[in-house]
Image (cartoon, rainbow, N blue to C red):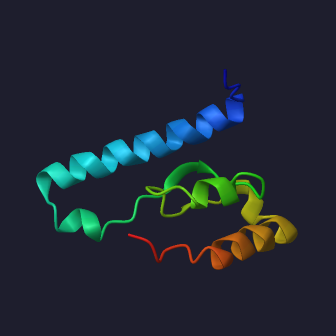
Amino acid sequence: MAIITLKQLLDHAAEEMHKMIRALISEKNTNYVKQVKIIYGSSLTPENSNVLFNMENINGGLVGRFSIDPQSFIKLCHVADKLNCGEKA
């Protein structure tokens, strides 16, 4: 029996929602869906950015309050840079 945390469940739910949005776009225009970037609409944190940026259907995210704290923002930028965020379709 697998034990899943609330955080893992929320991360999975975010990926599933992005996957559904991508599928809806694909139904209307299969060429456009290859170009569209779908970002995570909740606030990214240094703790959740690595997991979310590694998900197949999440192409970025809103930084929110962590953009005010230079150290947190730098951590987010390093994660995004390491993972080549924005480069995946």
Instruction: Report x, y in % for residue 55.
Output: 53, 55
- Where is the C terminus found, in terms of image quarters? bottom left
45 vs 22, left or right, is right
Instruction: Report x, y in % for residue 35.
Output: 29, 71
25 vs 65, left or right, is left
Instruction: Report x, y in % for residue 25.
Output: 22, 52
Instruction: Report x, y in % for residue 13.
Output: 52, 36
Give the residue furthest to the right. Answer: 71
Image quarter of residue 66? bottom right
Image quarter of residue 72? bottom right
Give the residue furthest to the top. Answer: 1
Question: Please, is residue 89 above or below residue 87 in the view?
Answer: above
Camera-side residue of 37 and 51: 51
Task: Give the residue displayed 67% in from the left and 20% down from the top.
Answer: 1
74 vs 55, left or right, is right
Task: Give the residue displayed 32% in from the left and 46% down from the top.
Answer: 21
Task: Give the residue displayed 47% in from the left and 77% down from the top.
Answer: 87
